[in-house]
Image: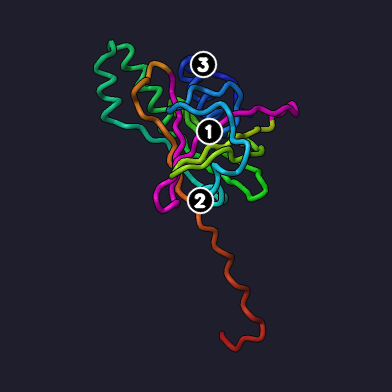
Amino acid sequence: MLPKNQGCHPLVWGVALAAVCLLSLGCGGDPKPAEPESTSPPTDKTALQGTDLPQQLVGIWLGDARIDQAQFEAHLATMSPEQQAEAKNIVANFLTTVMAMQYTPEGLFENEVEMSINGNSPIRDVSLGTYQVLAASGNELKIKVNERLADGSSAPGERIIRFSADRNQCEVAIPLGAEFAGVTTKLVFTRQEITSVAETPNPNSNSR
């Protein structure tokens, strides 16, 4: 579990915890999605036909936080100096976020997220759970997740994952709060190719 708040600003700490929840794709209290989502999952496999996205999600992904800087600068112009300082601090902390995630063909996921608050040593959290594909269309995949909590319960949620055309990158929107409305904040992931370990030399080889 993450360490408790040790004196950082409540809003900053809230962003840290929200980021961990959102990055794990499985915390309860699902935030308002970047785009409207259907509340009714498909009752058959029609929505999943004709797309390779469910298969493309399987694997290991490494990502980091991104923000639309032009949108953020325009947003800052509407704030007071005090609000600007707070917003810049929140964004600076958010941009330290890195995450590794793995999805298996059996419907399991494991996520590890790391984030630094106010320049302090990084905090890290790991989450495990199960996932189910609800819908896939174009380059968007909608999944339902259940994260396993320390007390043995599970936290359900839904997320939309958007893939690049070559399927080697994907992204998840990470809302930072109502005060950042209109500013695109997200995690961008790159697929990791796992290479086999070097072949053990043949003891009968004549090579020296």
Residue 7, label in figure: 3
Q: Please state which amino acid type lies under the numbered disc 1.
A: Arg
The scheme the figure's colours follow is: rainbow
User: Which residue was labeled with disc 2?
Assistant: 50
Crowding at mark 2 (Cα within 10 Å: few <14, some 14-19, many 20+)? few
Q: Is 157 a magenta residue?
A: yes
Report helix, strand or loop for mark 3: loop
User: Which residue was labeled with disc 1?
Assistant: 159
Q: Please state which amino acid type lies under the numbered disc 3.
A: Gly
CA separation in Å, label 2 and label 3: 51 Å
What residue sits 65% from the left and 27% below the top?
155
Residue 184 image position (x, y, % from top left): 36, 29
Which callout, 3 or 1, points to the residue nearer the camera? Answer: 1
Residue 146, placed above or below residue 107: above
Determine the image quadrant of residue 2: top right
Magenta residues? 149-177
What residue sits 33% from the left and 13% below the top?
83
Q: Is 55 a magenta residue?
A: no
